[in-house]
Amino acid sequence: MDVSCKGKVLVTGGGGYFGFRLGKELASEGMTVILLDVNKPLWDIPDGAIFLQSDIRDYSSLHKVCEGVDCIFHTASYGMSGPEQLRKEQVESVNVGGTNNVINVCKERGIPRLVYTSTINVVFAGKPIVDGDEASVPYVPGDLHIDHYSRTKAVAERMVLSANGSSVKGGGKLETCVLRPCGIYGPGERRHLHRVMMNVERRLFSFRFGDPAARMNWVHVDNLVLAHKLAAEALTKKKGCIASGQAYFINDGLSVNLFEWLTPLFEKLGYSRPSITLPVSLVYSAGRFHLLLQVRNITVSHTFKIDKARQELGYCPQPYSLADSVEHYLKIRQSRDTPISLSLPSVRQLAERGILLLLMGLGLVLLIIYGILS
């Protein structure tokens, strides 16, 4: 990061995978870093950083820890996946209420820069998007979001962008920008890769489903860290505040078919790559709400250009391989008390697998009968 950007920074969500990686990198470059989160990090706190256990919904606490801070990286959020998606009030209070607190603290503490970690879900709700860009892809209307997380992230993103140019205490203005990453992967990542791993083990990926040509983007954690550092620089006068009030799609610069991209995972687990394609309706019929959202994201193309980030931020993503992340993940799993090869599914998981396989089997029978009669 440019020397003009060195100082004291706050990373909300600093106990999570990405927030911690970002804070660690900033600390390694000489900045004083505050990692703020309700959950303690799983990793050792790096030199140059401190961890404070607090909630962004607690305004007085947030205001107190922000003394002397000159940039906030707001990565904290709630309700991205799993059962927590259904906790509507908590999703709203963290993603919207917490973001409102962050913005107000910036104004009250005279903090001149705010970088917000958003998501592609603010513009994607299940309809295909191919090579979308910031100018041509609009927000999903609020009533068309099917999950609270995406809706509240869109609300929060708009709040952050609307706050750009606001006066801050002590003089000056607040410069804000928004980054919209896709799914994150990298060594030690637990949320996305773990979820995919569980679905492979549950045989969700025993078959292909949806459009076989569907493509999506991913972003390696180190590329996402790079994008945030560049965004913070681009909010400074030295860079002409070029990023002020702007949103940027961030990914590795590649679009991939998920089933092809997961080949290293299938190979490491000893599974063959799925070759039979089923109607997506059969998969939907066997899923719960949070599973349906995953299926939606897999079966519909949604890819985004990063030209704007390249041109305005100087973002140049480095090439990475999923194979390295899979190898790291499996080493961690196998070092635990219950190796992955010996893990036993619960009764509920067995029942879900049975229902899913039964539905798939019935679907195949119906397809065969239909073929004979037609």
Image (cartoon, grey):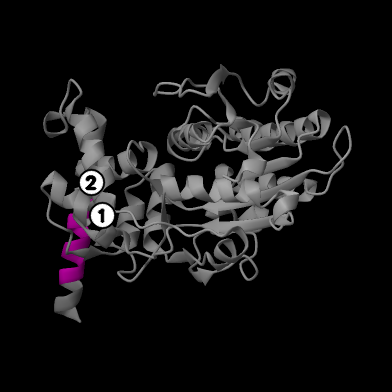
Q: Is residue 144 something one can see in this rendering?
A: yes
The residue tagged 1 is 262
Looking at the image, which is closer to me, 360 or 142?
Answer: 142
Q: Nearer the viewer, residue 346 or 11?
A: 11
Q: Position of residue 107 (x, y in %)?
A: 81, 34
Assess whether residue 257 is covered by the magenta stretch: no
Residues at marks 1 and 2 touching, judged by CB atoms closer than 8 Å? yes
Q: Residues within 10 Å of mark 2 (few under 14, many from 20)?
A: some
Main SS type for the magenta part? helix
How far apart in space, not on screen, are marks 1 and 2 (Cα)?
A: 10 Å
Q: Residue at x 56, y 46 (%)?
A: 228
Q: Looking at the image, which is closer to me, 149 or 55?
A: 55
Q: Which element carries disc 1, helix, strand or loop?
A: loop
**Comparing marks 1 and 2, which lies closer to the viewer?**
1
Asked which quadrant contains residue 199, the reply is top left
The magenta region covers 358-368
